Amino acid sequence: MPKVTINEQVYEVPAGRTIIQVADEAGVEIPRYCYHPDIGIEASCRMCLVEVEKLPKLVPSCATPITDGMVVRTQTARVQQAVRYAMEFLLLHHPIDCPVCDQSGECWLQDYYMEHAQHTSRYPGTQKTRRIKATDLGPLVKFDRERCILCTRCVRFTRNVTHTGEIGVFNRGHAAEIAIHDNKPFDNPYSGNVVDICPVGALTSSDFRFKVRAWFLKGTNSVCGGCSTGCNLRIDHSARALGGGIPGVTATEGTIYRTIGRRNVEVNKSWLCDEGRLSFHTMERWPRLRTSRRAESLELILPLIHESFESIRSVHGQDSVAALGSATNTNEALFLMKKYFQGRVDFRLGSETETYQQKQDDLLRRVDKHPNTHGALDLGLAGNLNGLRGLRALAQSKQIRGMWIAFHPQLVGEDASEILADLEGLIRALDYSVVSTTHEFPWTSAATVLLPMAAWAEETGSYTNYAGRVQITNRAVAPAGDALPLHTLMSTMLGLSGVQVSTDPSAIFDWMARETQGYTGLDYTALGALGVPTAQETETVR
């Protein structure tokens, strides 16, 4: 492999890499605006210029392939002067909008000015070019032409990623500007990604705009729960740690303000679909279930539930008690549910098992709107109970008399009315029913016991995506009211049956891995931020 020297350090790297790619992997910081690893190379901003030995001019590191023996310097006086000149040029007509700009606090112009420029402008502020401000490119994207630095990231995203080509650069020279072809609305299913990749405040989110300043937010890495792809994302929220703990683990009840795509080249690269990006708003559609129906503490209710299930088993047999989970529950919760109910567990509400690998489009979206169908199948929960319809039939024939139903609404789209009707019919056919759910749904009114359950972003655990990649979904905010994660409820129930189980998701996962085919040898800590494939993984997103 070629050897390249960057700032007196020698690196051996695969052929075909560019200088900026090698620098990023080595932790060498090179400023950039137009470069992004997933949208193609433009080399137009001239911020990433570096000095290469034996070459007379500075070269853009994003567009220069490495060669064996190449010597690169990124911090010479010549490079620093070039970066300062580039910054001065970009700021020449940039408006002084920082106090009112939604990008303030995470703007690359601010960061690079402080780090690389700190010049005094030689251009009077009164002579700055004025352009149209705050126009709608589409339902999710606001555009401020004065702030645009023509990095063309948004242009290349629509050209090279979505292949829809709505955005282009119009006119030439000083009159050049970003616009939409034929003034059509920018409403493709991935439009929100241009906000993520815009390095300045030119493109902002209509959903997030002016809601909160970036420096008041905490970020928690997690996984989208909107479909079976399992896109990596960051949840930005207002929850604060209690007692010096870790935000998202021991946190006050907070508010989620936005989600941003997190790069994982094996799953979603850097992108999110708009449905998944906004799916956290699903939690706001209905009133949250904050306490049990009896308004008693869960510590008092769970022993009574266990006694009721044991009584039914003693009279009608072991098979008279079962459970229905959800493909939005974590692997850990479903595994403990399977243990407590002695394998009498199903999760199929509809056609999840037929659709979890079907594409909805050619980029990211899948037909199955649940994040963990593959995990539930790996746990063997698609047995002879035959899903929701089968369980309802068994309850109506009195072969099943008691059930625990754990329901989490779809984060994207609507749960079919037929599913909700079957759930209500199942509850009414049972002698004894426990429903743990996230919201106050009308169909739960006939349940014997109604328990509040933590929702997505309120619990930590793992999902297995459509391709068999196991990834960690993290808790960002505290559950509403008295709600607890399902794995915590099931751990308590197992304890009541005489099996002491930790509530730590990592301990539960390690137990599950020892007993589940394809997961043997997997370690929770090794899942890391990007996940690990199981032995059954068959495909990655391209």
Image (cartoon, rainbow, N blue to C red):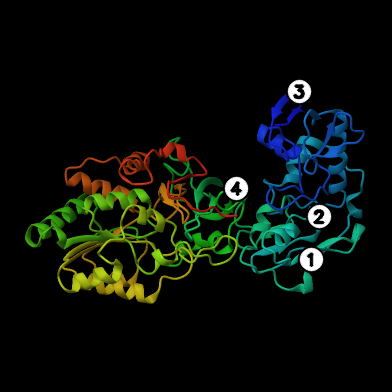
Look at 76% across and 73% down and name the residue there: 183
> Residue 161 occupies which quadrant of the picture?
bottom right
Q: Nearer the viewer, residue 103 or 374?
A: 374
Q: Given this view, does label 3 or label 2 mark the residue nearer the observer?
A: 3
Q: Given this view, does label 3 or label 1 mark the residue nearer the observer?
A: 3
Q: Which mark is residue 48?
A: none
Label 4 and label 2: CA atoms lie apart by: 23 Å
Answer left or right for 211 relative to 306: right
Label 1 and label 2: CA atoms lie apart by: 11 Å
Quick one: SS at disc 1? strand
Q: Earlier in the sequence, mark 4 or mark 3?
A: 3
Quick one: SS at disc 3? loop
Where residue 322 sits: x, y (%)? 21, 60
Dot 3 amino acid type:
Glu
- Per the image, the residue denoted by label 4 is 263
Label 4 and label 1: CA atoms lie apart by: 27 Å
> Residue 13 occupies which quadrant of the picture?
top right
Q: Earlier in the sequence, mark 4 or mark 1?
A: 1
Where residue 283 sits: x, y (%)? 45, 62
Quick one: SS at disc 4? loop
- Per the image, the residue denoted by label 3 is 8
Name the quadrant of the N terminus: top right
Name the quadrant of the C terminus: bottom right
Q: Are marks 3 and 2 in contact (CB under 8 Å)?
A: no
Label 3 and label 1: CA atoms lie apart by: 44 Å
How many residues crowd mark 1 within 10 Å: few (<14), some (14–19), many (20+)? some
- Per the image, the residue denoted by label 2 is 150
- Per the image, the residue denoted by label 1 is 179
